[in-house]
Image (cartoon, grey):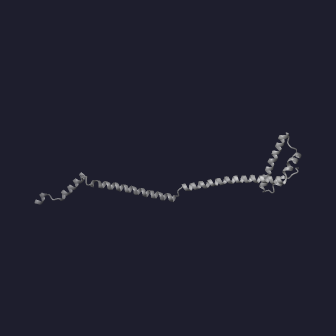
Amino acid sequence: MWGHNLFNDLVQGDDDFVGMVAYSVYKQEKVRWIQKHHQDTGRYPTPEEMQTYFYNQHSRPESIRRYRGEAEAQLNAFIQATLAEELLVYQQEIRDSEIIKNVKTPLHKRLIEGVVAGLISTALVALISMIVWLYSIMEPVSENQPLPKALKEKIESQVNKHTPSPASSDN
């Protein structure tokens, strides 16, 4: 059995997430120390070497505070990055919904615009039709133009019907 109880020193309960992250920071440091020892000496450290050179130094109260501090810093960085991402997504969702709201015209407004456009176009067509009709009626009656031949003949025939002939008045 090892002569240390670092897990219980770092993790203060089942729901101590900071302590669990601190323990993983400790384990990462331990693995690096073992790899460096193996690289320097060509062999892995013995349990006695681990106790003397690693556990005794890393189980001190200041080391435990350092591990927990690193864990808190890592967790805070993770939380900030996560919140920044979520905030960015939330901002994009709000922006997109505002764009959609501003682009999509409400039904009642579209109906009013359609009715107004229909009334305006109907009024313009009626006005243009009246102008063309009035122009066509007024054109033959102008001073410089004689009456059309067919109209002139009709007027003369009507006048001749109602005018007594000189032969009938002598009788």
Left of 110 or right of it: where is 153?
A: left
**From this viewpoint, which residue is outermost toward the left?**
171
Total residue callouts: 0
Quarter of the rendering occupied by the C terminus: bottom left
Front-lying residue, 29 or 157: 29
Q: Position of residue 34 (x, y in %)?
A: 83, 44
Residue at (58, 56) in percent of width and height: 98
Front-lying residue, 137 or 73: 73
Q: Position of residue 89 (x, y in %)?
A: 64, 53
Residue 80 shows up from this direction: yes
Residue 8 shows up from this direction: no
Left of 99 or right of it: where is 29?
A: right
Q: Quadrant of residue 40?
A: top right
Residue at (72, 52) in percent of width and height: 77
Front-lying residue, 91 or 140: 91
Left of 163 or right of it: where is 94?
A: right
Residue at (80, 47) in percent of width and height: 29
Identify whether 33 is placed above or below 103.
Answer: above
**From this viewpoint, which residue is outermost toward the top?**
42
Q: Position of residue 119 (x, y in %)?
A: 43, 58
Q: Quadrant of residue 155?
A: bottom left
